[in-house]
Image (cartoon, rainbow, N blue to C red):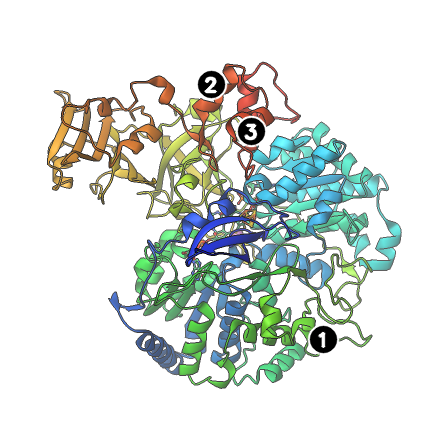
Amino acid sequence: MITTETIKTTCPYCGVGCGVDTKVQQGNLIAVSGSKEHPTNQGRLCVKGSALAETVSHQGRLLSPKIANKNVDWNTAYSHVANKLSDIIEKHGPDAVAMYVSGQILTEDYYVANKLMKGFIGTANLDTNSRLCMSSAVAAHKRAFGSDTVPGCYEDIELADLVILTGSNLAWAHPIIYQRLAKAKAERPDMKIIVIDPRKTASCDIADLHLPLKPGSDGFLFNGLTHYLIASNKIDQTFIDLHCEGFEDLSENVQQQTLVQTALDCDVSEESLKTLYHWFASNERTVTLFSQGINQSSSGVDKGNAIINCHLISGKIGKPGATPFSITGQPNAMGGREVGGLANQLAAHMELNNPNSLNKVKRFWNAPNLVQKEGLKAVDMFDAVGNGQIKAIWIIATNPVVSMPDADKIKQALAHCDLVIVSDSSDSTDTLQFADVCLPATTWGEKDGTTTNSERRISRQRRFLTPPKKAQDDWKIICEVAKRMGFNEAFNFASSADIFREHAALSGFENTNTRGNNERDFDISGLAEISNLEYQNLEPIQWPINSTYPKGRKRFFDDGQFYTASNKAHFITITPRLPTYAADCDQLILNTGRIRDQWHTMTRTGKAHRLLEHIATPQIEIHPDTAAKLLIKNTSLVSLKDRGIEYIARANISDSQRKDSVFVPMHWSDEFASHARANSLVRPIQDTLSGQPEFKHSPVTIKPLTPHWQGVLLSASDFVPDKRMEWFKTPLANCTLWELIDLETSPSFTWLTAAYPKVDQWVHFKDSEQRYLSAAGFIGNLLQVVLLSGPELPEYDKAWLAKQIGTEFLPDQDRLRLLAGFPADPSLQTGKTICACYQVGEQTIINTLQSGEADSVEHLGEKLKCGSNCGSCIPELRALVNSHSSECISSVVETNNAA
Ligand SMILES: Nc1nc2c(c(=O)[nH]1)N[C@H]1C(S)=C(S)[C@@H](COP(=O)(O)OP(=O)(O)OC[C@H]3O[C@@H](n4cnc5c(=O)[nH]c(N)nc54)[C@H](O)[C@@H]3O)O[C@H]1N2
Ligand SMILES: Nc1nc2c(c(=O)[nH]1)N[C@H]1C(S)=C(S)[C@@H](COP(=O)(O)OP(=O)(O)OC[C@H]3O[C@@H](n4cnc5c(=O)[nH]c(N)nc54)[C@H](O)[C@@H]3O)O[C@H]1N2
Ligand code: SF4
Ligand SMILES: [Mo]
């Protein structure tokens, strides 16, 4: 009898941190579902989480350690890395080596990486992709609270009467929190939701108000709010007197930021601003949730503090439904902060610039070479790699050639570096192309440890799959190298549980102040002595976990106690600034970020075909007026340029954009497109306080491209596009779809036949001027490849045509039908996929709406099942209902036409 085992684990994607039940049969993952008992998601999963089972195959995995591209055994790899690092340290000192890690490794991996670099090698050149993500919020928290504390919890979002989302596209980036918010709003329609974002995003679907502000102007807006609260006496004077410092300076600082002035500064109407300010002032229970539209800015820390000031001044903190809320992006962004994974942190929320902390950690670790000064932050770190100051870099679980700003410079830096070590689970990332040593890591499902989500909740990621034979856990790889560098005793861990106990013990080590309270917020000493079994069974729990809070703590600052010297919170005066580079009159502002179904550089979500159906190729979102002025048509090819570097994608014309900006997804890499790494364009401007790059505001010039020839090619086998072609690649279930573009000439039929030497039968069509070429190639009677091409991108039914690849077509069948691109029977057409879970296409939905079989999102769900699993497509379903039925419901009061 085949047995099915259910193992509980945590989703490896976003910082929401949903619990996942995995069903495993004979070592294979057969299904995933949301854990009903997990407090975060209570049974739900978003579309990425639902597709997890499709991403765990060993296809595309790095399967052996490699040195100079040759497979080696692990012992050779460990010794090689250890010896090389030791040599470099001996010759050039510890600061000549660096580690660049990730908010996607587990806390246990992170802990040993930090311990090795800061305690034993003796350099703080250990930074993380969280620098690109959370570092501005970390710095803002520390300035205001004296500690990097997220005060609230998810429940606050549901309890609030007003939720402000600023710089957050919650619907796509944190879907389960968005669903919890949407449900709360449906149950309490009086609850207000405001979205502050230059773009009208899917999150606006449930908003009462959208402010499409001038990019980068949030600092003005929140200083304006502080001014309004003071001027209209909507402040909490008792809370300020008892628990805050710096009120007079703050009050003086915001004097000029009147409503009229702020409306001008932010390019929004006075009316909408007044509504926002009035709602904030009159709702005790207010949550301001902020993310990358705030953090990824040259003044991200200041913006964070401008938000926190508004909450402190009105006492909206530490209470149910009232908190500023920096929502984290990666699954373990918080765990990384706990272990000290940033180059300016020490460990366990202790600081590098505090002699007392240095002394404690030195004694706790028995560390021979404890660092004394901060290390280089990500952008500076890669600069130092580029100029030879850093001679070895070990990159773990991140893909900087795609995700760092000025990404072509990252390529150059790595190409010139003496020793590039890359630990990854994938075998083909853009960064691996520059590795001297490749180390195959285990990944989700195969590794074992903990992560901490946005509300400080620690959850277990459990092993339920057997890893590929030669893949190794990240903590193990780091410890094996450390031991071979002579640090045997400190890295002699037997398991991740062993590491976790040490991490928990450090958090409680001499963690009391003179009044007998915690000196540091992060304290999980209550878990320092858990047994292996208790660790295995650990239930999700919010830190701190200690003798005062043995079951965890929902909210910080409910007691008005902060972690500053005076125990009072600090108001921070800021001078609002716009982004470093303004766009000239012939430029636009490049805004970058996430799309619904892809995760970062697509190394994992790119394996799940249904996740590539919502948006399959990179696109440039642009306002209709801007597009018209530049003679850009929808789906036509467009070039963005800056500093001689070009990005190429198709236009997506949408009035969701402001006229001064374009939006481009951050996800595409050289694996998936010829010129669509957004970060090749993004300038390496950083916030001087946090080092976080300004990913959202780079100037670009834009122009339409007129291809001479374009085509789609569906191929069952490998295909390499001609060097002169631009291309986008989309893996589908049974074949790969290539969009091919030639800007100057048309390829010949001979080019195609040469690319497919094994194809023995062709049907094809071409015109005398060679502008059109369509062909289908067969091996025997099996369809291998179809090309449809001409001066314009041909129209065709993707789902139908893809289904034909690999199937049999006898010579007397209508093979020419393939060249039309559509089925003979029109009722077989489905259109672009909207619901990825149930594979429901746009055309099917429109047909159903137009026939009157459904007239609401709920009815569509009943009829076609669309939107009834993860719910991620509900905003788009609603848009289709709105545009294809007579009633148009819109609660959004301001549109982008104001821009
Ligand atoms: N589907 C998906 N979900 C993800 C991820 C993913 O890759 N894919 N990644 C995860 C990670 S690591 C992170 S950090 C989070 C990020 O989550 P979010 O921060 O929500 O995502 P982004 O799309 O980067 O940016 C959010 C919004 O900021 C807006 N913005 C740009 N400039 C400004 C501005 O000046 N002011 C304001 N107010 N808004 C502005 C953008 O238009 C965008 O809509 O997502 C997490 N979740
Ligand atoms: N333009 C622009 N750029 C951005 C952003 C933006 O908004 N705009 N956002 C920034 C933000 S917030 C973030 S968080 C970064 C994210 O950017 P990255 O960190 O570069 O993105 P990922 O694709 O998640 O990279 C994770 C890598 O780890 C590998 N991996 C998966 N599991 C494991 C494991 O267990 N062990 C090891 N060793 N490897 C593993 C994956 O195959 C993948 O190569 O991008 C940043 N870059
Ligand atoms: S919201 Fe989606 S991606 Fe994020 S943790 Fe939950 S299931 Fe995973
Ligand atoms: Mo992130």
Three-letter amino acid code at the position of disc 3: Gly
Quarter of the N terminus within the rendering: bottom left
Q: Residue 81's image quarter?
A: bottom left
Three-letter amino acid code at the position of disc 1: Asn
Residue at x 77% of width, y 32% of height = 190
Q: Which residue is mark 1?
A: 511
Q: Which residue is mark 3?
A: 861
* Figure check: 58 above or below 118: above
Q: Closer to the camera, 540 or 347?
A: 540
In space, the residues marked 2 and 1 are separated at their CA atoms by: 64 Å
- Front label number (2 vs 1): 2
Q: Which residue is mark 2?
A: 847
Residue at x 43% of width, y 55% of height = 2
Regarding mark 3 in the picture, which secondary structure is present there? helix
Q: Closer to the camera, 158 or 634?
A: 158
In space, the residues marked 3 and 2 are separated at their CA atoms by: 14 Å
Q: Earlier in the sequence, mark 2 or mark 1?
A: 1
The percent position of residue 115, horizontal first and vertical second, equals 53, 75
Three-letter amino acid code at the position of disc 2: Asn
Going by the image, does 833 lie left or right of 769?
Answer: right
Regarding mark 2 in the picture, which secondary structure is present there? helix
The percent position of residue 79, horizontal first and vertical second, equals 34, 79
* Figure check: 771 above or below 260: above
Q: Earlier in the sequence, mark 1 or mark 3?
A: 1
- Front label number (1 vs 3): 3
The number of discs equals: 3
